[in-house]
Amino acid sequence: MKITDVVIDANATIGANPLLVDVRACYVYVDGKKTENIEGYRYVVALPDHELEKIGHAYLLEKWRLRYFSKCRGY
């Protein structure tokens, strides 16, 4: 089996009706220090089908479009 052939069923994995519980800004860091510049946002959802376990995804803002950014600081 190739990893590219795997299909994930989101409803079977995280359940139905995830709840948005938090939105946090992700800041730019320069030389290990946080700046005031926002580079994206982390969205945190609670999963009712999994005892309200929380998961989060961060999105990086870049040139008027969103792209996935896996390492967002500040969460």
Image: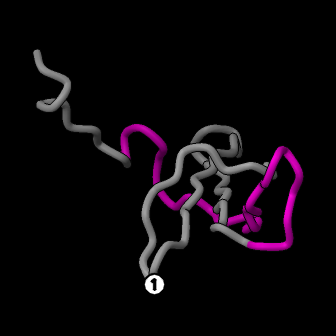
Q: Quadrant of residue 64?
A: bottom left
Residue 19 at x, y percent in the picture: 63, 63
Q: Quadrant of residue 30?
A: bottom right
Q: Is residue 32 left or right of residue 58?
A: right
Which residue is disc 1 drawn over?
64
Quarter holding the N terminus is top left
Q: Secondary structure at mark 1?
A: loop
Q: State whether residue 38 is above or below residue 44.
A: below
Residue 3 at x, y percent in the picture: 20, 24
Residue 44 at x, y percent in the picture: 67, 57
Which residues are the magenta region?
11-37
Q: Residue at x 45, y 71 (%)?
A: 66
Towards the viewer: 20 or 57:
57
Give, as a three-letter code, the residue at label 1.
Trp
Residue ranking furthest to the front: 31
Towards the viewer: 49 or 55:
55
Q: Residue at x 12, y 20 (%)?
A: 2
Q: Residue at x 54, y 62 (%)?
A: 59
Check residue 30 for magenta coloring: yes
Q: Is residue 27 left or right of residue 49?
A: right
Q: Is residue 1 left or right of residue 3?
A: left
